[in-house]
Image: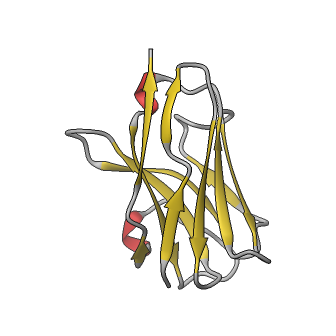
Amino acid sequence: VQLVESGGGLVQAGGSLRLSCAASGRTSMGWFRQAPGKERDFVAAISRSGSNTYYADSVKGRFAISRDNAKNTVYLQMSRLTPEDTAVYYCAADPSRLYTCSNNERDYVYWGQGTQVTVSS
């Protein structure tokens, strides 16, 4: 499975961005992020069908993960962004799950190259 992220950039605090991840296959997908000097953290995940989603507490109510299976693309709509959301965002694929999704990065086998999101104050 190959993954290609897009949509990152610079935005002011309170603004919005939408990230996209084009995949070569259809699997359970997740978004993770890594801020400078910090470990990579889970952000959101979506099951293969899109019927199940899972969010980190820090983004719940602000971010929304979705997918268009006809286009093999997963999206992360980010709203009410804060400087603390600044990070490199990675999408990842978990081919082992059919109906659920995971917040554990060890379950994800395939990773994109990452896209930078910078939120200015």
Quadrant hosting residue 45: bottom right
Identify the residue shown where x is 53% and y is 65%: 102
Of the 4 image quadrants, the one containing the C terminus is top left
Q: Is residue 45 above or below residue 106?
A: above
Residue lying at the far left in this picture: please name it.
37
Residue drawn at (69%, 34%), measured in percent from left and top?
A: 61
Place residue 47 in its image quadrant.
bottom right
Q: What residue do we see at 80% from left, 77% from top?
A: 70
Q: How many marks?
A: 0
Residue 46, how many percent across, how many down?
65, 63
Is 25 rendered above or below residue 38? below
Residue at 53% from the left image edge and 44% from the top image edge: 56
Percent x, y for residue 42?
A: 45, 52
Left or right of 110: which side holds 44? right
The location of residue 73, given as percent across then percent down, is: 67, 69
Q: Quadrant of residue 101?
A: bottom right
Residue closer to the observer: 86 or 12: 12
The vertical placement of 33 against 109, above or below, is above
Residue 32 in picture, x, y percent from top left: 44, 54
Choose between 26 and 44: the one closer to the eye: 26
Residue that protrudes farthest toward the top in the picture? 121
